[in-house]
Amino acid sequence: MTQLPPMLTPILWQMVQIMLALATAPLVTGYVRWLKARLNGRRGPSPLQPYRDLYRLTQKEAVVAHSASWVFHAAPYVVFASAWLAACLIPTFTTNIFLAPAADMIALVALLALGRFWLALAGMDVGTAFGGIGASREMLIASLAEPAMLMVTFSLSLVSGTTQPAQIAAYVLGGHIGLEVSVGLALAAMVMVAIAENGRIPIDNPATHLELTMVHEAMVLEYSGRHLAMIEAASMVKLTLYMALIACLFAPWGMAQPGAGPEGVLIGMAAFLLKLGTLSTALALFETAIAKMRVFRYADFLGGALLLGLLATIFLYVSEAV
Amino acid sequence: MLIAVALLALPLLSVLAIAAGRRDAVHGLVYAGAFLCSVALIAAGLEHLGGRLGGAPTLVLPFGLPWLHAHFRVDNLSALFLLIINVPAAAASAFAVGYSAHLPERRRVTPFYPLFLFGMNSVLVADDAFVFLVAWEFMSLASWLMVMADHRKAENRRAGLVYLTMAVFGTFCLLPAFGLLAGGDGDYTFASMRLHSLGPVAGSLVVLLALLGAGSKAGLVPLHAWLPLAHPAAPSHVSALMSGVMTKVALYGLIRILMDLHGHVGWQWGAAMMVVGGVSAVMGILYALMQDDLKTLLAYSTVENVGIVVIGLGLAIAFKDDGEKNLAALALVAGLYHAANHAVIKSLLFLGAGSVLTATGTRSLNGLGGLLKRMPWTGATFLVGAAAISALPPLNGFVSEWLILQSLFKGPVVPHWAMKFGVPVVGALLALAAALAATCFVRAFGIAFLGRPRTEAAAEAIDTTFGMRWSLAVLAALCVVLGAIPVTVTDALSAVVQPLIGTSFAVSSDLGWPFLSPVSNTRGSYSGTVLVMIGLALFGIAIALVHRIGNARVRAADAWDCGTPGDDPATQYTGQSFAQPLRRSIAATVFQARETVTMPQPGEDAPARHKLTMTDPIWNGLYLRIARLVDLVAEQVNRMQYLTVRHYLLMMFCTLVFLLLVVAVRQRQ
């Protein structure tokens, strides 16, 4: 194989990642649904079903309420593009990607907040009670989950000296981190945030259509056709993105470093798919085993995540001092 | 020269407005004149920042105190704040040309508006304490007069009273602060204050007094109580300046005293400022979330943002004391960047609120709804402002909060345990405030501009006129530009920070132009420019792809709403219902929010009632107690008014003896 000029390698891997982020996302969601169905004793739809669903939705005409403004029309694309962009920024199979320096963890959190901001506005745009319920609850969750994630970033930046996901991965790969209490706490906080942000059980049930318990589904209730397809795709990308982020920060093993050849990248890709599989299985098992909690208990759950993040930073000094 | 001309023109405009205020055309003329003055001051500020690094020579004019002539000087810090103040001021003046025609009380506003601008700009160019304080009072009183413009409303009179009290308190604190800075020989020029070194007690006292004096003007918790009363009471273009700009003058005063005149502020004060800033940020935005009045909400959000700037300042002081000059420069750049951003964003939002108020006649969120369709310009620009203040990329608010977080994450390098443990807590507060701000502005924009109109007035609202639209659009464009090219901004700010910290520091040194990489290229970097380009590309691809492979038709229909659409717009979520989850989880403890539902008995035809009560912990716990104490003392003192002549003579005699004793003792020493 001819060697690429070193300037172009990150751009090539970036292109691959842009495609990969989009291609794997429906599969992850489909696999989690299939496994949950199996665990519940049902046969369940094939893991490839989300691809078919998305295609079917794009083929339908979009029905838009009379009272909707341009925000309603623009939101699905903004939500999708922000999730997609965020997914491009997280190293998955190699740390050597072109866009890695364009955003760090803080920017990533904010980029996801951008999507949520638009989704909440879209929920309120038509002027129905359900849209308002969903937007209000989603923003409550975000108000607590976002700071928790920033605290995770803070503690990781204290350990590794950087807020850049690629650099954190490189640091972990360098073997500088042993088993540390604060990293464990940060991981726990991160997982709780990921569950909340993706609307999984126990915070929200992605399969529910029982009105009073919906969060995410209530916001997107008025959407149909290609708009709904965009929003569904965005939430699939977001789920995969959080898995990729957890894998990148806490388990970057196998990831190709700058300078690695094509075989290194292939190993990286295999490792990434394996990690996605493991995390999806864990998610399905967890969701099957646990019940959804009441809306007003969210604050306890996420406040716990925030405190864990804070403890993670403080434990660093305690362990330093001891 | 340009500055002098512009500054002198402002009081003349005021005179014109008083002399010819009866004619409607004069109001427009005065605001147009104020606009030109602001443009001139912007030009002067830009010229100064772009040109020399050092300061201009001091200009001494023969007025002021007899032994102290008036000193004026523009250095980089003043030049930056000239920009921060006059860019929103120019927009507000341009807005007011059209807006003042809608104001019934305009004859009580127009004369004081140029004086207000005059006061704020004079604070920036003052180079001695006397000019500074006189200009400061000009600013306070001119804005007070405009708060009281609509004095028939009882709430405005109350706002005026609280504002005046707090303004007096602020100056009362600044006066001795300057006195201590000048020392015993009474040379009140800033140049001699810089040379005068302070003892530890006097030094701490100066910091405390400056924090109380400038902090009360800036709206730091717990000195913020006047701000959410006074800012909304004034007409909207004045609210924009009070909230967006006057708080920045206060921050300028704080920076001038703590980082320039005061030789050395200890890290403990930096840490204290970070805590005050963090608490202000969270409390400010929590208050804002509970408001129904759009302008009060915006005013409380100012408290939040001032808190964020003060976190940056405190961090800069702590780093500077510890000798970490690069990090100090970074923190100060972040703080100044946020101050500039907030000036632009908050002016934009207040002017937008002004258009809404003119169009619908109400500031209450629950009387609005669906305005985006009726008022596309105001709506779109308000949306940009809301996204920017919620710190969403790629707008300007995000860049400055990113820089503050980046410098905060380096906070634990200061080798004190209080900092190591305190910084993560402040970080959590800041992150919480930023996330709550997004909730607050989703609520504000969603309730006011989206959904269906809740009242007749909202359903028939008409967008603003041509000139007003353009001032909104320019401010919104600035939000985008300041966010998309952060590196250019931080490079300009480095020149401002250099004389204060003593090191020149380029925030973007490592990765080159479009990337901000404040500490090093592996530490953390951000590029608004790249994100915007790639994001727009992905956005375009998504739209093109879906429209190509999919069905591009749109059908308009009734809202579905799970099959139960209600025609009544009252079935929508309101501001109160949107805030309910947060009210139950956080505000239940902070504000003691209690909800009681009274259901009628079966067979009764009374309506069910939902009652919400909240208490303001700071107002009740601090202000009312102080007020009660003052009342108590006043009552005791009051008795002295009813003494006999003998008693009065006795008191005079005692006083005389006491003073003579004092003189005798002092002479003995």
Image: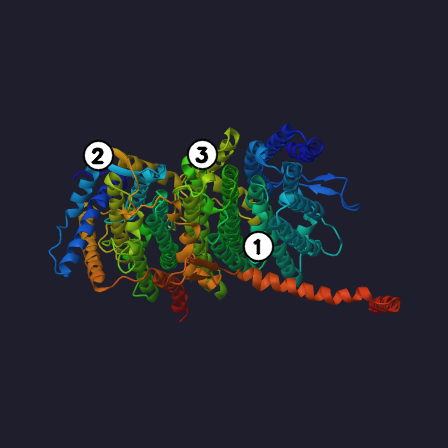
Mark number displayed over residue A110: none
The answer to whether B591 appears left or right of B238 in the picture is left
Residue position marked by numbered label 3 in the rendering: B377
Q: Residue furthest bottom?
A: A322
Question: Chain ID for label 1?
Answer: B
- B395 lies above or below B582: above
Quarter residue B63 falls in:
top right
The residue carrying mark 2 is B551
| Residue type at numbered disc 3 | Trp
Q: Is residue B201 left or right of residue B348?
A: right
Residue at mark 1: B224
Q: Position of residue A292 (x, y in %)?
A: 27, 61
Residue B430 vs residue B289, the one in the foreground = B289
Counting from the top left corner in percent of width and height, residue B315 is at: 51, 55
Residue A194 visible? The answer is: no
- Secondary structure, mark 3, is helix
The x, y position of residue A56, in whole percent, is: 18, 40
Q: Amino acid at mark 1?
A: His
Q: Residue at x 58, y 51 (%)?
A: B229
